């Protein structure tokens, strides 16, 4: 049951996001970059980080993880850029505009790594909810799928902006969503050991979203300083933030990352051993 719920939650949110972003949004990728900035910033600052800090983990350790995450994603990007430029160094070719775009929109790998961490944490949460009560598990899985959709739309736009084809963007996002299934399995068997790690996993995911928004997407937006374009950008950023706030508002009441829910889940493990 846990495996099914995590798979449906992960794949369902990907399919929902794909329908939205690969139809209308793919024709407006540049405009939708602004929407993605709002989605990524709101997911990190209004959802993932508050839940991590509400878990009771040491704030200093969480801030240290955030710092390490930001520096880690910077180094990951630096390595990929160095490899890319070394590969094309001195080849004597005049590279097409798409090549330059791939180098400029360099956040594809970063968003996939961050999203994988986020999905893994969601899988653990779904497992914990099912072990507490199968009905709570179902509600939690549905709630997570619902609030993941706008975030996955943002991820699709980032990947398309980074030069991914539609099919590659869909495939990589789908593979990333399978981390929720892995998280569900790990949560079922190692909930005691893993529950303490959830806040740190969430902080690492948040650091990737913050890094992409601030280092890659926002500088792209700054290249269009015209008033009209700037107003549209601000409106779309606000729309991205509003979407996450609206989608996650009711979710916090349905589930929590860490804390008492996990302890309760472990206590009830024996009563619901058949949930798996």
Image: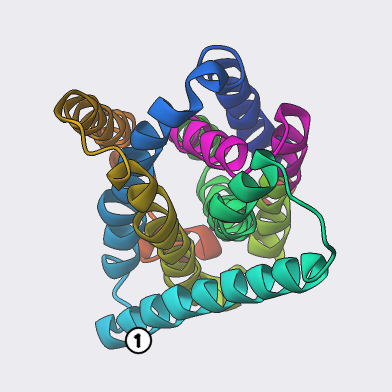
Q: Going by the image, does 139 lie left or right of 130? A: left
Mark 1 residue element:
helix
Residue at 43 percent across and 55 percent down: it is: 216
Q: Is residue 201 above or below residue 48?
A: below
Residue 100 position in % (x across, y down)? 62, 49
Number of numbered tags placed on the structure image: 1
Residue at 64 percent across and 40 percent down: it is: 97
Colour scheme in use: rainbow
The residue segment tinted magenta is 146-175
Q: Residue furthest top?
A: 24
* Residue underneath mark 1: 61
Residue 168 position in % (x across, y down)? 77, 37
Residue at 35 percent across and 79 percent down: it is: 62
Q: Going by the image, does 44 lie left or right of 249? A: right
Residue 252 position in % (x across, y down)? 30, 43
Which residue is more in the foreground, 80 or 128? 80
Q: Going by the image, does 168 lie left or right of 243? A: right
Q: Name the main secondary structure of what is drawn in magenta.
A: helix
Q: Residue furthest right?
A: 91
Residue 99 position in % (x across, y down)? 69, 47
Queried whether the magenta region covers residue 154, the answer comes back as yes
């Amino acid at each position: 049951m846990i495996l099914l719920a995590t798979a449906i939650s992960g794949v369902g949110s990907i399919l929902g996001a794909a329908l939205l972003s690969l139809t209308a949004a793919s024709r407006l990728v540049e405009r939708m970059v602004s929407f993605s900035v709002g989605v990524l910033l709101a997911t990190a600052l209004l959802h993932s980080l508050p839940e991590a800090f509400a878990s009771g983990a040491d704030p200093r350790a969480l801030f240290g993880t955030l710092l390490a995450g930001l520096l880690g994603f910077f180094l990951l990007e630096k390595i990929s850029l160095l490899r890319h430029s070394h590969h094309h160094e001195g080849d004597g070719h005049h590279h097409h505009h798409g090549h330059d775009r791939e180098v400029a929109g360099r956040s594809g790998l970063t968003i996939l790594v961050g999203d994988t961490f986020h999905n893994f944490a969601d899988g653990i949460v779904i497992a914990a909810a099912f072990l507490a009560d199968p009905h709570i598990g179902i509600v939690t899985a549905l709630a997570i799928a619902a609030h993941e959709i706008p975030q996955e739309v943002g991820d699709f736009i980032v990947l398309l902006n980074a030069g991914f084809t539609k099919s590659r963007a869909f495939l990589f996002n789908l593979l990333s969503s399978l981390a929720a299934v892995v998280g569900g399995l790990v949560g079922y068997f190692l909930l005691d050991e893993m529950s303490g790690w959830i806040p740190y996993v969430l902080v690492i995911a948040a650091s990737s979203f913050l890094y992409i928004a601030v280092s890659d997407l926002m500088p792209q937006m700054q290249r269009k300083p015209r008033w009209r374009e700037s107003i549209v950008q601000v409106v779309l950023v606000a729309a991205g933030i509003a979407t996450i706030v609206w989608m996650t508002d009711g979710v916090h009441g349905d589930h929590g990352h860490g804390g008492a829910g996990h302890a309760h889940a472990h206590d009830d493990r024996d009563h619901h051993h058949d949930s798996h």
